[in-house]
Image: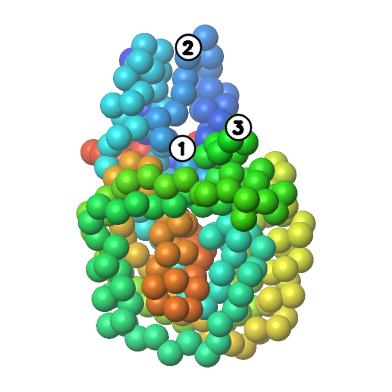
Amino acid sequence: MKKVISVWKPVGMTPLGAVKRFKEKNPIHNNKTVSYAGRLDPMAEGIMLLLIGEENKKRKEYEVLKKTYETEIVLGITTDSFDALGVIQRVSLPLKINEKEITSCLGRFVGRQLQLYPPYSSKPFAGKPLFWWARQERLPEIEIPQKEIEIYDCALLEMTQLPGNALATDAMGRIKKINGDFRQDKIIIGWKKFGKKYTTDNFIKIKLQIECSSGTYIRQLAEDVGKKLGCGAFAISIKRIAVGNYTISNCVEL
């Protein structure tokens, strides 16, 4: 019997929800300890490793495995969560950024670096998760923690343009898949207003493939890329396509 099972977590599902769904579909494991090694945000999809029984003792070995992501980042818009599940903060138009500028910018992120934790994350500070401080509008009172990460490669796969109404429809479709309290109603209202206001305005969307160390936040990287380019950015989609040697080819659908 397998001790490690690679599953594909869909958009909208929490990591704990993925464990629950796995057990529902595989009742043979109901009396065993099943946990995940390396979480994924609800808005992200992709590979998660589930550890069965005694293999949970080796969790740290699995958590540090290299990760590979595909992500789509929209330039010219910022949100407070750095992904689509956030309140829109700023819109910058028109955009005058070319592929050469983007490629050069991405190259600056390759290597070891300190990365801030996103404000809307569960990283604790003074006994409270960062999202608590964010929701209380008390982020100016604290120093957001950071950690050392390494990005091994950051490649531009595609660069396209997307009208504002299509972008809003995409964002709202993803948000509606989310269960739990993530301010969805407020955020969807914001995206509806955005779609009406910027119906025919085009935004640049870039698709990247990123190889990185464990613990790297892709939506934080999107925010940082937007700052470097001077236009703002957020991650509209995040997909983890590999964890170490575990790939889509040996992944179980939930």
Mark 2 falls on what kind of element?
loop
Q: Which numbered disc, 2 or 3, marks the residue closer to the eye?
A: 3
Q: Residue at x 60, y 61 (%)?
A: 80
Query: Quick one: label 2 or label 1, which is nearer the N terminus?
Result: 2
Q: Secondary structure at mark 1?
A: loop
Q: Is residue 117 visible?
A: yes
Image: 160 above or below 222: below
Judging depth in this view, the residue of 157 and 252 nearest the camera is: 157
| Callout 3 crowding tier (Cα within 10 Å): few <14, some 14–19, many ≥20 | few
State the residue in front, 1 or 177. Answer: 177
Indicate the secondary structure of the residue bearing disc 3. loop
- At label 2, which amino acid type do we have? Lys
Residue carrying label 3: 127
Residue drawn at x 65%, y 84% is: 198
Report which residue position mark 1 lands on. Answer: 39
Q: Which mark is residue 32?
A: 2
Residue type at tag 1: Arg
- Which is more foreground, mark 3 or mark 1? 3
Dividing the picture into quarters, in which one does residue 245 lie?
top left
Residue 168 as seen in the image, left or right of residue 253 = right
**Residue 212 x %, y %:** 29, 50
Residue 177 in sight in this render: no
Residue 163 screen position, x and y as percent: 57, 82
